[in-house]
């Protein structure tokens, strides 16, 4: 099996400091959490930012500050979200890509209900524009799959040459409105992928351990961090993002998987050259 890529997602748009006081909010805190996670063995950082009131944001300024602070500290591969604020317009969701040109960015491959109170809109018009921006800027899309139909959307964009093979998929399992997090569902999803694809998977909340273990055993990658889960185990809050990364690395090693360094991820994904 190839080396496992451990991604850290240190802060998303759900949990707040009231849920876990160790959740990083400011660019400086996010960069520090990424740095500690890199030291623990994470090779990719999936980044969201918050505004000064802790609210999820697509602020170009916050992305820029966070991006540069991380770059000063370490060579981790940076993956910027394009879905950091459910109310953001199309242009706002892409402006940071044009300005910062991260090596990877998320590509959410369809629309769904979100947390039973909103719509997570990824209109085909937006996905087409987003794919073109990523192609123009040589940014590798991480194709996030929240439900099975999103796989057929991805196939459509591959056919249109808007997504270039080999495609890297991220299975987000157990989100309200998305595919339930079960090992059976994960093995089904993996079987649907094109031969040359790479993939990662994680389960939201209490599903994070079984899906992480299954993904590592099945030859995939995984993602940990406070975006998806703020607990270390039932009822016990995680102390830090790095603590979750440490466990993922330890599990990978126990299962006979080596973990990839940022440099190895760059080679594996043929990422655009980018100095530290
Ligand atoms: Zn995200």
Image (spheres, grey):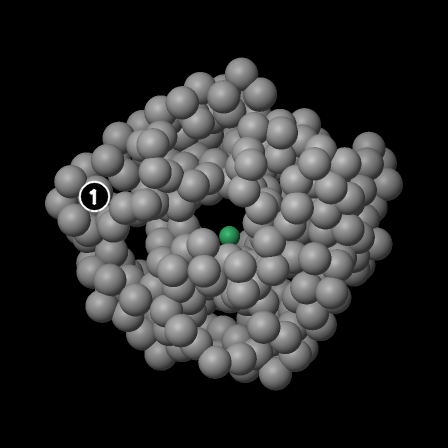
Mark 1 CB near ligand 1 (8 Å cut): no
Which residue in the protein does label 1 denote?
157
Q: Quadrant of residue 54?
A: bottom right
Callout 1: few (<14), some (14-19), or many (20+) C-alpha neighbours within 10 Å?
some
Q: Is residue 179 above or below residue 244?
A: above
* Residue found farthest to the top: 184
* Residue found farthest to the left: 160
Q: Is residue 97 above or below residue 11?
A: below
Can residue 182 be seen here? yes
Q: How many marks?
A: 1
Q: Secondary structure at mark 1?
A: helix
* Quarter placement of the N terminus: top right
Relative to the observer, which residue lies in front, 46 or 215? 215
Q: Quadrant of residue 18?
A: bottom right
Q: Where is residue 149 drawn, in percent x and y?
A: 31, 28
Q: Quadrant of residue 263?
A: bottom right
**Which residue shows up at 65% across the image and 79% down it?**
73
Q: Is residue 177 above or below residue 72?
A: above
Q: Where is residue 232 drawn, in percent x and y?
A: 80, 42
Can residue 11 be seen here? no
**Which residue shows up at 30% across the image and 66% down it?**
138
**Which residue shows up at 44% across the image and 19% down it?**
188
Relative to the observer, which residue lies in front, 156 or 233? 156
**Left or right, 73 with reference to 221:** right
Q: Where is residue 8 drawn, in percent x and y?
A: 62, 55
**Which residue shows up at 76% across the image and 36% down it?**
254
Q: Is residue 85 above or below residue 117?
A: below
């Amino acid at each position: 099996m190839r080396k496992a890529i451990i991604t850290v997602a240190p802060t998303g748009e759900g949990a707040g400091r009231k849920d876990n006081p160790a959740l990083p909010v400011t660019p400086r805190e996010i960069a520090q959490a990424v740095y500690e996670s890199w030291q623990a063995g994470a090779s990719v950082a999936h980044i969201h930012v918050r505004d000064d009131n802790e609210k999820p944001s697509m602020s170009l300024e916050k992305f820029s500050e966070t991006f540069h602070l991380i770059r000063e500290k370490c060579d981790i591969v940076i993956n910027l979200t394009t879905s950091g604020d459910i109310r953001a317009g199309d242009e706002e969701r892409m402006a940071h890509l044009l300005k910062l040109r991260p090596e990877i960015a998320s590509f959410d491959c369809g629309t769904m209900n979100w947390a039973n109170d909103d719509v997570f809109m990824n209109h085909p018009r937006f996905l087409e524009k987003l794919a073109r921006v990523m192609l123009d800027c040589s940014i590798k899309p991480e194709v996030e799959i929240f439900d099975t139909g999103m796989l057929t959307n991805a196939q459509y964009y591959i056919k249109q040459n808007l997504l270039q093979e080999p495609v890297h998929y991220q299975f987000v399992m157990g989100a309200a409105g998305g595919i339930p997090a079960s090992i059976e569902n994960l093995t089904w999803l993996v079987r649907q992928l094109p031969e040359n694809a790479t993939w990662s998977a994680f389960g939201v909340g209490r599903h994070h351990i079984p899906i992480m273990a299954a993904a590592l055993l099945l030859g995939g990658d995984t993602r940990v961090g406070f975006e998806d889960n703020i607990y270390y185990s039932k009822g016990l809050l995680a102390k830090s993002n790095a603590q979750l990364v440490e466990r993922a690395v330890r599990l990978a090693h126990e299962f006979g998987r080596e973990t990839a360094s940022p440099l190895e991820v760059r080679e594996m994904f043929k990422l655009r050259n980018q100095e530290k």
